[in-house]
Image: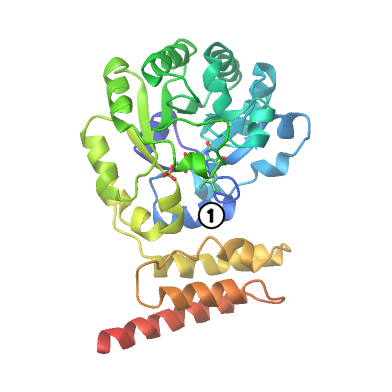
Amino acid sequence: MKTDLSGVKRAARLSVAPMMDWTDRHCRYLHRLLSRETLLYTEMVTAPALVRGGALHLLQHDMSEHPVALQLGGSDPAELAQAARLGAQAGYDEINLNVGCPSDRVQSGCFGAVLMERPALVARCVAAMRAAVDVEVTVKCRIGVDDQDPEEVLPEFLAHMVAAGCERVTIHARKAWLQGLSPKENRDIPPLDYDIVQRLKGLFPNLHISVNGGVTSLDQAQAFLDAGLDGVMIGRAAYHTPADLLCAADRVIYGKGHDSSPEAAVHAMLPYIETHLAAGGRLNQVTRHMLGLFAGRPGARQWRRMLSEGAAKPGAGPELVQAALEQLEALAAAQEAV
Ligand SMILES: Cc1cc2nc3c(=O)[nH]c(=O)nc-3n(C[C@H](O)[C@H](O)[C@H](O)COP(=O)(O)O)c2cc1C
């Protein structure tokens, strides 16, 4: 079922970040089993791929993923509007524009973080996307790039977004350095500045602002919400330790429901895996997102090893996942007995 507009905003109290090659539909299916409420984002899909390349398969997702947002990359207002239309028609609850990703490929196409230097263009993109769809149009940005002064450029950037009708932004609370750092380094080396995000919330009280970058626990996320921010987006920690971040999220962040368990999620993945294999897919396309499910628990290493070694073998199926879970449970029971 699609989610209504206010539902998406509520869901945005906690979100799992868009991550290329990571938050594909199998990953999102798993995350949704762990948390009913958290807003999920797709990997970035470029507007040219959808509009010029006709790559509509990139929009495939499962109905259970809602609330789910499509992230687009691009900088041509008309093309982004058309891509947003395709995304809304495909059923996404939100269309997000990437103004934060510093990879070479993204820079060369004039996508992503380099657009922090062109707020008027981003505003035209947002306005065109908004005119094209009924679902919310949002932006994910950095606090600045290269030698920009965030105190100067970020308020100006957000003012442009508000004027263009953007009601919600997610700010990755560090700069992107477009020269000399790899995309991976750009997620770690420029220092985090949460204070500026907090101050910007004071300046733009009606703009829904989510903070992103370096959040590794639900307690930390809750502290940002308590301090007045509207949402928290979590990337790497949600991917590497999904149970720690998502199993208690519905109760802790939304005051709803019961905690989920990674064991129950594994059981629920088995029929999903059967369907994926029956459609010609491979086991490790799904299980690679499940490796961190038991991180920090007895048997986690063996779980990870059994799946990563076994899932790429021809003919591997759900029985491998079942056997890995049984092994994990036996190891945990043995440890408890000691
Ligand atoms: C593997 C990977 C791929 C990413 N791909 C995207 C992307 O497609 N779009 C985007 O806006 N950010 C992307 N990011 C950045 C994350 O969305 C997030 O902003 C960043 O990881 C900081 O949050 P974290 O410290 O919670 O991980 C990616 C990050 C990782 C680790």
Position of residue 100 relative to residue 274, above or below, is above
Query: Residue placed farthest to the right in the image?
Result: 53
Mark 1 residue crowding within 10 angstroms, few (<14) / some (14–19) / many (20+): many
Q: Residue at position x 56%, y 41% from top?
A: 183
Q: Which of 20 and 142 is in front in this view?
A: 142
Q: What element carries label 1?
A: helix
The answer to whether residue 67 is seen in the rendering is no
Image location of residue 171, percent across then percent down: 41, 30
Image location of residue 130, percent across then percent down: 55, 18
Position of residue 53 relative to residue 29, above or below, is above
Position of residue 274 relative to residue 62, above or below, is below
**On the rendered structure, is 300 left or right of 44?**
left
**On the rendered structure, is 326 left or right of 204?**
right
The answer to whether residue 6 is seen in the rendering is yes
Q: Which of 166 and 154 is in front in this view?
A: 154
Question: Where does the C terminus fall, quadrant-wise?
Answer: bottom left
Q: Nearer the viewer, residue 237 or 263?
A: 237
Q: Residue at position x 32%, y 18% from top?
A: 206
Q: Residue at position x 47%, y 75% from top?
A: 303
Q: Nearer the viewer, residue 29 or 298?
A: 298
Give the amino acid at mark 1.
Cys
Which residue in the structure is indicated by mark 1?
27
Q: Residue at position x 56%, y 65% from top?
A: 287
